[in-house]
Amino acid sequence: MEYSKIKDLLDLYFKGNTTLDQETSLRAYFYSEDVDDRLEPYTVLFNTFEKAAQDVFEGSLLISKKTRFNQKWWLKLAAVMISIIGVAGFMYSANSKAIQEREALAALKQSKDAMYLMASQFNKATQRLSLVDQFQETKNKYLK
């Protein structure tokens, strides 16, 4: 066969658009001895496909329909439980954050109240110190 015809068939083959007859002619070409040197790497591919087609599984598989049903049922139950746990965890964490925020705001209010009390006491003390300063000045005037 011509190189261009085989190349076009390969393009169709890899796109999945070949017919069974076209695939048979491709396999026959790559199993023959007169493969073009440019298409030599594809020979390995088609030989591997041929060897894989000859493999036969001789073991036995037992899949009961009851087991499949139970697996699906358990998977659904597990998904529902995970969802419930996730929602409950989110609600609990949101509730605990709200409690923590309320406690933090209460502590902030207490701190502000304590700061206002200290500030008012400092203001009173400053006024008394100014009176002490005036007393000192007056005393110094008369005692000199």
Image (cartoon, helix red, strand yellow):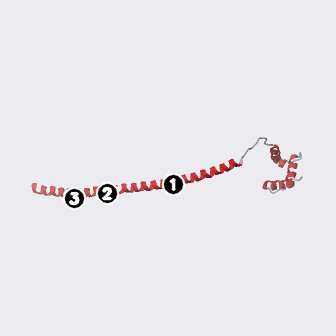
Q: Nearer the viewer, residue 118 or 132?
A: 118
Q: State the residue position of label 3.
A: 127
40 relative position to 86: left or right: right
- Provide residue 105's location: percent of width, then percent of height: 39, 57
The residue positioned 31% from the left and 57% from the top of the image is 113
Q: Secondary structure at mark 1?
A: helix
Spatial CA span between label 2 and label 1: 34 Å
Q: Which of label 2 and label 1 is nearer to you? A: 1
Asked whether the residues under the numbered discs 3 and 2 touch, taking CB atoms below 8 Å apart as contact, a structural biologist would say no
Which label belongs to residue 90? 1
Q: Residue furthest left?
A: 143
Q: Secondary structure at mark 3?
A: helix
113 relative position to 86: left or right: left
Residue 144 in sight: no
Q: Earlier in the sequence, mark 3 or mark 2?
A: 2
Is the residue marked by circle 1 packed among few (<14), some (14-19), or many (20+) residues within 10 Å? Answer: few
The residue positioned 66% from the left and 49% from the top of the image is 70
Q: Nearer the viewer, residue 2 or 72?
A: 72
Q: Quadrant of the C terminus?
A: bottom left
- Using the rendered view, name the quadrant where residue 98 is placed: bottom left
Q: Earlier in the sequence, mark 3 or mark 1?
A: 1
Q: Residue furthest top?
A: 59
- Identify the amino acid type marked 1: Phe
Q: Earlier in the sequence, mark 2 or mark 1?
A: 1
The residue positioned 55% from the left and 53% from the top of the image is 84
- Provide residue 96's location: percent of width, then percent of height: 45, 53
- Identify the amino acid type marked 3: Gln
Spatial CA span between label 3 and label 2: 21 Å
Asked whether the residues under the numbered discs 3 and 1 touch, taking CB atoms below 8 Å apart as contact, a structural biologist would say no
